[in-house]
Image: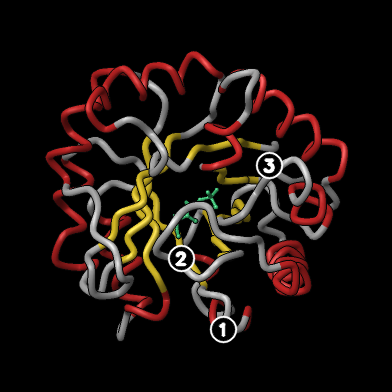
Amino acid sequence: MTLPIQIAPSVLPADFSKFGEEIHALDEAGVDIIQFDVMDGQFVPNLTFGPDVIAAVRPYTTKPFEAHLMVYTPDVMAQRYIEAGCQRLIVHAEACTHLHRTLENIRNMGATAAVALNPHTPASTVENILDLVDMVLVMTVNPGFGGQSYIKTMEPKIRQVRDMITARGLGDTVHLEVDGGISPTTIAGAAKAGANVLIAGSALYKDPQGLGHAVTELRALATAAFAD
Ligand code: DX5
């Protein structure tokens, strides 16, 4: 058994001058989770949200928050993002010298822990920590910016991670998320490869029929294509 399809926005394209309203609009559009793309300007060449920004918009929805920590020092800031209202923290394997300990610490602080893999990082990286996570994120772009093109060559890696999850009997507890370039034309490939949580930024905000239509369309396409 695998977990249901979930559609989650990247908030990078949102209007930050009215961020709270934008979060409410995403809730109304039917997203399952809200992902904050946290960037430190070092691990990736961009700088985004501190914990206080997330805390400020927490009251605008009851939907779960996850912080995608594209940062070199997730251990330093993890507690602050949990206190700000994030239920899940996603750390990059490439940024963690002691990934096993980092994930254990996040769980001990009361959040769920997830690990992200950049395009060059092999699926085998998560083999020894699958028992500590509730999600693996396979990046389908090189992190740092929205609006990039989907890297289709990541689909065999998505399939590898899905098969690892299934082989360990973790299909009903561990999600497989993809992030980057997800749109109506790319989502089926990612879902067919085994992704059940799909992050979309540009595709949501570019839909001329609005956020709600975009979420509904992406969910339908992913559900039809998903293969575990
Ligand atoms: C990492 C960012 C983007 C974003 C998705 O670079 O976190 O992947 O979430 O942006 P789109 O959906 O526009 O590719």
Query: Coloring scheme of the render?
Result: secondary structure
In the picture, the quarter occupied by the C terminus is bottom right
Q: Amino acid at mark 1?
A: His
- x and y, in percent, of residue 201 in the image: 51, 42
Q: Residues within 10 Å of mark 3 (few under 14, many from 20)?
A: some
Give the crowd class for mark 1: few <14, some 14-19, many >=20 residues within 10 Å: few
Q: Earlier in the sequence, mark 3 or mark 1?
A: 3
Amino acid carrying label 2: it is: Val
Q: Residue at x 47, y 53 (%)?
A: 146
Specify whether 96 is left or right of 147. left
The quadrant in which residue 70 appears is bottom left
Give the secondary structure at mark 3.
Answer: loop
Q: Position of residue 5 (x, y in %)?
A: 69, 38
Q: Which residue is pictured at 63% across the width and 23% down the height?
A: 208
79 above or below 42? above
Element at badge 1?
Answer: loop
Q: As rendered, which of 70 and 197 lies closer to the eye?
A: 70
Residues under labels 3 and 2: Cα distance? Answer: 17 Å
Q: Residue at label 2?
A: 115
**Residue at the spot of label 3:** 3
Disc 3: residue Cβ within 8 A of ligand 1's nearest atom: no
Q: Nearer the viewer, mark 3 or mark 1?
A: 1
**SS category of the residue bearing label 2:** strand
Q: Is residue 73 above or below residue 61?
A: below
In the picture, the disc for residue 161 is none
Residue 126 on image: x %, y %: 55, 76
Mark found first going from the N terminus, 3 or 2: 3
Q: Which residue is mark 1?
A: 120
Tell me the quarter of the image containing the N terminus: top right
Q: Earlier in the sequence, mark 2 or mark 1?
A: 2
